[in-house]
Structures are given as structure tokens and as C-alpha cells.
Image (spheres, helix red, strand yellow):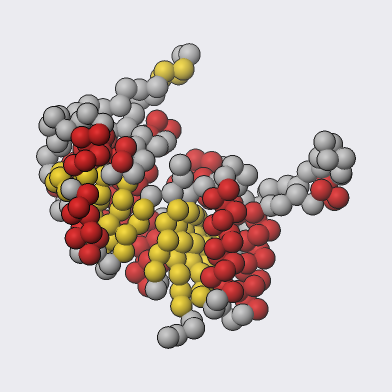
């Protein structure tokens, strides 16, 4: 079974969880043998052009020591063979189209989404 | 077409915060009503849905004590769905993401709800007729 994980919400709980929960879930299920792909759409396309780790949260004398490393998490996915796509028009609408994409991320047009969906058995919209 | 199917649900929202939670439970009830067995993977805040220490309270604004207010509790909704499934000879399985449980301190869950992780979601989804994911917003 092939599943496409659609991440439409960016930076959801990334401070508290120190990762993106769906990228984490994908990595974990990949380790359990899951055949998964990732589609970054909507605000999720921000992940495709990230180039730095999240800054640590500081509250009074408390400072976060392990902020999220979304660049690393996406790289881990692509290097392990998980296809990662980003919607071209969603990048353009947010003024992100001119920024370099993370290695391994492929652009897909909105018109191409139907073909992408046809290539998997289930689509999980998060 | 078979009447007996298994549907998997992955849900992220906590109790008492979102209308999605009510809708999610209505979908579970509807699935059982239509003869489908149900498997739930509770992720992030949704692990609190099965927390055994949820307690009803009175409501002074409503002018009712705890018994009169009869405040809805998601642990009771889960129990009711477990009983509905059993009455219809269907299965109703529920697994909480263990790490999500630990970080929230909601380890004490009602009977019939277990602890697991993403491999359980993958197993649930692989065996099910279909899977519905409902992420938080």
C-alpha cells in the first residue's frame, strides 16, 4: 500500500514537539516498513525552502536546547527514498518561488496533483 | 458488497477544544451504525480523549450541580462506542500514541484503549478498507 501524506499546515506545534508531527510520523512509519510519499501544499511549502534550524524558545531563565530541525527531517526522508513534492503555485503565491529548494524536493503543479494522487492507494490529508 | 468493513481513523484533536472532536465521534458512531468495525489511532492531543480521570463538574452559570449538569466526557463517549460495537458484534480498537501520552501525563486510560505508536497506525491502515486522517488546525 502506498500512502501520500499531505502536509498543508506549516510550523504546527514545532516549538513544543521539536519537530513537525507529520514529518515525524512519516519517518517513524517508514521505519516500520511504510511505503510513503509527502506532498507539501499550502503553508506546508515553507518547509521546501527552509535553510536553517528553528531558533530556540527562551522564556525567562528557561532556554530550549533542541529546537526543531525540519531541514534535517526532510533530508532524512528524501535520503531514505521517500519522494517529497511541493506545489509550485503555493510557493509562487507566498513569494517563495525564487528560493532554492531543499535537495530532493520535487515541484508539482496543481494540475499535476491528480496524477500524483492516482499513483498512490490512499491520501492522508493532515 | 460486503456489509462488514473495517475503517481506520487517525485523529489529533483533544477533548473540549474543537468541533472536529464531536464530528470525529459522530463519524465513529456512523461507521458502527453502518456495520463497519473501527480502529482509532489517537495522536497528539487526541490521546486525552481516553483519559480515565476526566471528571464531570457542576455549572453555577447554568444553575446545576454536577449530577444535574451531566457534563459530556469523551471517555464516556468511547465507552459507549465500545458497547455499541460489542452489541453489533463489531470490533472497536483504540491505540494512543505512547509518546504523546507521556508528554501530557494522561497515562491512566479507560479499559479497551491501548498504548502504541506509528507502526500501529500503519498496521491499522494496511488492514483497513480505508483510512480517514483528521489533523488539528
Measured along the vertical axis of the image, is residue A70 above or below residue B49?
above
Q: Nearer the viewer, residue B128 or A66?
A: B128
Using the rendered view, name the quadrant where residue B83 is placed.
Answer: bottom right
Where does residue A68 sit, x and y in percent of width and height? 32, 32
- For image coordinates 85% across by 50% down, the residue present is B67
Q: Is residue B116 visible?
A: no
Q: Left of B8 or right of it: where is A35? A: left
Where does residue B64 sit, x and y in percent of width and height? 86, 44
Where does residue A52 sit, x and y in percent of width and height? 22, 26
Q: Left of A34 or right of it: where is B80? A: right
Using the rendered view, name the quadrant where residue B137 is placed.
Answer: top left
Measured along the vertical axis of the image, is residue B112 above or below residue A10?
below
Where does residue A86 sit, x and y in percent of width and height? 21, 44
- For image coordinates 18% across by 42% down, the residue present is A88
Measured along the vertical axis of the image, is residue B25 above or below residue B7?
above
- For image coordinates 75% across by 49% down, the residue present is B71
Q: Which image quarter holds the N terminus of chain A?
A: bottom left
Residue located farthest toward the bottom when viewing the structure as drawn: B1
Using the rendered view, name the quadrant where residue B60 is placed.
Answer: top right
Q: Left of A93 or right of it: where is A56? A: right
Q: Nearer the viewer, residue A117 or A34?
A: A117
Measured along the vertical axis of the image, is residue A59 above or below residue B34?
above
Count all numbered tags in the image, as a single digit. 0
- For image coordinates 25% across by 39% down, the residue present is A90
Amino acid at each position: 500500500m502506498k500512502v501520500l501524506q499531505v502536509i498543508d499546515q506549516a510550523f504546527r506545534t514545532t516549538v513544543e514537539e521539536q519537530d513537525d508531527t507529520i514529518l515525524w510520523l512519516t519517518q517513524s512509519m517508514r521505519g516500520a516498513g511504510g511505503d510513503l510519499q509527502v506532498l507539501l501544499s499550502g503553508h506546508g511549502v515553507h518547509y521546501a525552502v527552509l535553510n536553517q534550524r528553528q531558533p530556540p524558545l527562551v522564556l525567562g531563565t528557561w532556554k530550549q536546547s533542541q529546537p526543531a530541525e525540519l531541514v534535517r527531517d526532510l533530508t532524512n526522508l528524501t535520503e531514505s527514498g521517500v519522494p517529497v513534492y511541493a506545489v509550485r503555485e503555493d510557493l509562487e503565491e507566498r513569494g517563495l518561488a525564487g528560493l532554492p529548494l531543499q535537495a530532493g524536493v520535487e515541484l508539482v503543479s496543481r494540475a499535476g496533483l491528480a496524477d500524483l494522487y492516482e499513483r498512490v492507494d490512499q491520501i492522508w490529508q493532515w | 458488497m460486503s456489509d462488514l468493513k473495517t475503517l481506520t481513523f487517525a485523529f489529533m484533536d483533544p477533548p473540549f477544544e474543537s468541533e472536529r472532536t464531536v464530528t470525529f465521534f459522530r463519524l465513529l458512531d456512523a461507521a458502527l451504525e453502518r456495520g463497519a468495525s473501527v480502529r482509532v489511532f489517537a495522536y497528539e492531543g487526541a490521546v486525552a480523549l481516553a483519559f480515565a480521570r476526566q471528571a464531570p463538574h457542576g455549572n453555577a452559570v447554568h444553575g446545576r450541580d454536577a449530577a444535574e449538569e451531566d457534563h459530556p466526557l469523551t471517555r464516556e463517549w468511547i465507552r459507549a462506542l465500545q458497547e455499541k460495537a460489542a452489541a453489533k458484534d463489531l470490533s472497536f480498537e483504540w491505540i494512543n500514541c505512547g509518546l504523546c501520552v507521556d508528554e501530557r501525563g494522561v497515562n491512566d486510560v479507560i479499559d479497551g484503549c491501548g498504548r502504541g505508536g506509528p507502526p500501529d497506525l500503519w498496521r491499522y491502515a494496511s488492514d483497513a478498507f480505508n483510512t480517514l486522517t483528521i489533523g488539528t488546525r
